[in-house]
Amino acid sequence: MPRVILSSPDQKALLRLEPEPDGQWWTLHHAATQGRPAWYASFGARTPVETIAGFIDALTGPTALSAAEADPYEPLLRAGWTPDQGASTLRSPDTTASVQQLTGEGPWFVTVMLGESRPVWQARFGEHTPPHLITAFTAALADPSPVARTDPLSLPTRNPDLVTRTDRDVPAAQFASALENRVRTLAARCAAPPATPRTPRHPPTNPGRAR
């Protein structure tokens, strides 16, 4: 099993991959900076790599949203997620995933379940995690674009009501150049001017009983 530790150039962030059967596999710890206490983020073993990449890309790239403008709920609301069990929780249209912030200003939990007794994965963000990073994660989570998987048996479910599968052949050269292409894309993104800030949106109000 791989064990990896990566540190940022300024030595303030430490990303650790520590496979644990019952724990969070990916953990990022960030030291305190001016105006922000130390914070953390962690991801379970089955957390989709696209969502982790969205978070890490936002961490290493230019910040397009300020703390006041970033709203982790916004991408979910646009994707049709609905309030559930109060104002602080949103649930996905297929009811398998929920995003919750505890006590309004506390930590965030993103949980995916198949039924009431089958957890799939969970992502956790400390209360001081920059909001724009959590927003990048929820945007990747709500993205409806198809994702590539080489082993269909690794999917947590093959229920046709939840997952639509399409098989296709992909040239080996495409896999061989995937990392190089991604590095070029990230380099180009970092060189581009930041996007125009969006108008902030507030978390959903308490709707009472959702369903």
Image (cartoon, rainbow, N blue to C red):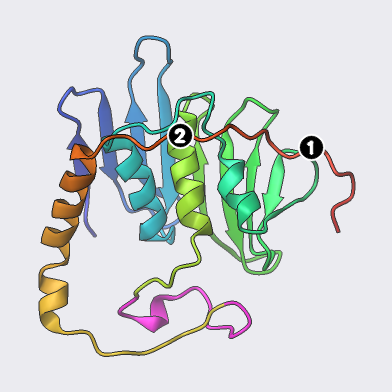
User: Is tag 1's residue or tag 2's residue first in the polypeptide sequence?
Assistant: 2
Q: Is residue 120 above or below residue 5?
A: below
Residue 106: quarter of image: top right
Q: Is residue 158 above or below residue 19?
A: below
Q: Secondary structure at mark 1?
A: loop
Q: How crowded is the residue under tag 2: few (<14 C-alpha within 10 Å), some, or many (20+)?
A: many
The structure residue drawn at horizontal position 11% and vertical position 68%, both measured from the top left corner, is 177
Please state which amino acid type lies under the numbered disc 2.
Answer: His
Q: Is residue 28 left or right of residue 78?
A: left
Q: Is residue 111 left or right of residue 80?
A: left
Q: How crowded is the residue under tag 1: few (<14 C-alpha within 10 Å), some, or many (20+)?
A: few
Q: Main secondary structure of the magenta part?
A: loop
Residue 79 in the image: x percent, y percent? Answer: 61, 58
Please state which amino acid type lies under the numbered disc 1.
Answer: Thr
Q: What residue would you read off at disc 1?
A: 205
Q: Secondary structure at mark 2?
A: helix
Q: Is residue 117 left or right of residue 151?
A: right
Q: What residue would you read off at disc 2?
A: 132
Residue 2 in the image: x percent, y percent? Answer: 21, 56
Magenta highlight range: 149-162
Q: Quadrant of the N terminus?
A: bottom left
